Image (spheres, rainbow, N blue to C red):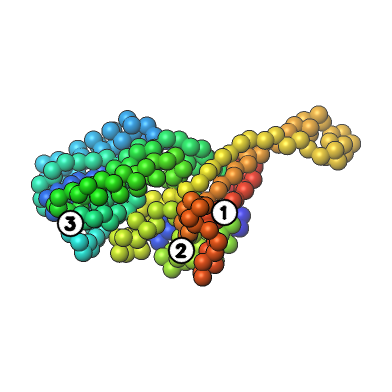
Amino acid sequence: MDSRTLSLSASTSTTNALPPRGLRVLVMQDKVILQDIGSFRKPASRADDPNCWIDAVNAAAKYYDSSSSAQPRQTPSSMLVIPFGDDIQPYETQDLRELKSGTVSHTLVATGFLGLLDLPSGKHLVLIKDVKHAGFLPRMRKVYCVTGVSIQPLHHNEIQESDKQVGSAVVKLLESGYLLYSEDYDLSSSLQKQIAEPGGNAHSVGNYRRVGKGFWWTWPMAKSLQDDALAMKWAQRTIYGYIGTCRLNIMPSSANLAGTKGSTVASSTPNPVWYSLISRRSRYRAGVRFITRGVDSNGSVANFVETEQVVWLENTE
């Protein structure tokens, strides 16, 4: 196997690790804590199953919020702390004392984190609340479509009418049925780019600026964390587009059917092949065709869509 294909397997380093597979969100008086609860999900559970998140968040709460003074039996999961205010400076920690540093007003459960949204009254946290199964890719990686989004204020200012107007427009776009992501595969970068990157590290902070950010649809919200490394580790890498996969049976060629002397009828068995089609809309110069036209000074054309075709054999690496 080509060593470059190792980048397609499960992430083996924090540099190119994919975002958490589920979050417990603790809203406090002066901050919000995002806690990774992926390790509390049951094996083979699906993100579109509500019971999956109920069980995971209950298990995490029982494990970390216990009054027992005993040390945790496993390494504490990572937490992203986002303080309130205009000049937000988020930070990552594994210190469980952070959970006891304030009174929790309420707790949310999210399938993923998209980033921060600037509204007239201040910054807001944008979370993926509901998803539905949208398909799969090679090695049966599941793809989900965002169907529900939650916006949580990161301030104590009065919510304005303009907040509701702008916020509802953003939510409508995110819940349009075309925002897709995968928990164990980066959809925003083509398979060719991921394999071609030297060392199989296409998702390091430096390289990612070049190979895939143009199709990461919610990157403007993710980069509001003011830290590219945190954005890449915690924010889901979404695309705005389409994914479809179908199974085809390819019959052997006539030359193979003829075979050699003594060949059996089994040689005419069709070969199952999977075909995937992925379309990604660029986030540069996106808009309705009556307003967004032509090309800009950077060479970005209006409503550019990259289409990728992947053909893969069943039951192979």
Answer with the quarter of the image where residue 222 lies.
Answer: bottom left
Q: CA distance from mark 3 to mark 1?
A: 38 Å
Q: Secondary structure at mark 2?
A: helix
Instruction: Depth check: give the residue in front, 61 or 148.
Output: 148
215 relative to 65, above or below: below
> Quick one: label 2, few (<14), some, or many (20+) residues within 10 Å?
some
| Three-letter amino acid code at the position of disc 2 | Tyr
The picture places residue 263, in percent across and down from the top left corner, at 84, 34
Q: Separation of disc 2 and disc 1 at Cα?
A: 17 Å
Horizontal and vertical percent for residue 215?
48, 56
Task: Say which label, 3 or 1, has the lower sequence index.
Answer: 3
**Kind of residue sitting beneath label 1:** Glu
Mark 2–mark 3 CB contact (< 8 Å): no
Q: What element does badge 1 sit on?
A: strand
Residue 35 visible at all: no
Pick the quarter of the image with the N terminus. bottom right
- Which residue lies under the disc numbered 2? 208
Q: Are marks 3 and 1 in contact (CB under 8 Å)?
A: no
Residue beneath the point at 13% across and 43% down: 105
Q: Which residue is mark 3?
A: 84
Q: Identify the residue at the far right of this view.
A: 261
The residue depicted at 32 percent of the width and 64 percent of the height is 227
The residue that disc 1 covers is 306
Residue positioned 50% across, 46% down in the render = 241
Question: Badge 1: how crowded within 10 Å, few (<14), some, or many (20+)?
Answer: few
> Of residues 213 and 63, which is closer to you in this image?
213
Q: Secondary structure at mark 3?
A: loop
Instruction: Estimate the spatial distance between the alpha carbons at disc 2 and disc 3, rounded to whole Å.
Output: 29 Å
Disc 2 versus disc 3: nearer the observer: 3
Q: Residue at x 31, y 60 (%)?
A: 224
**Residue 147 image offset from top left, x and y in percent:** 39, 38
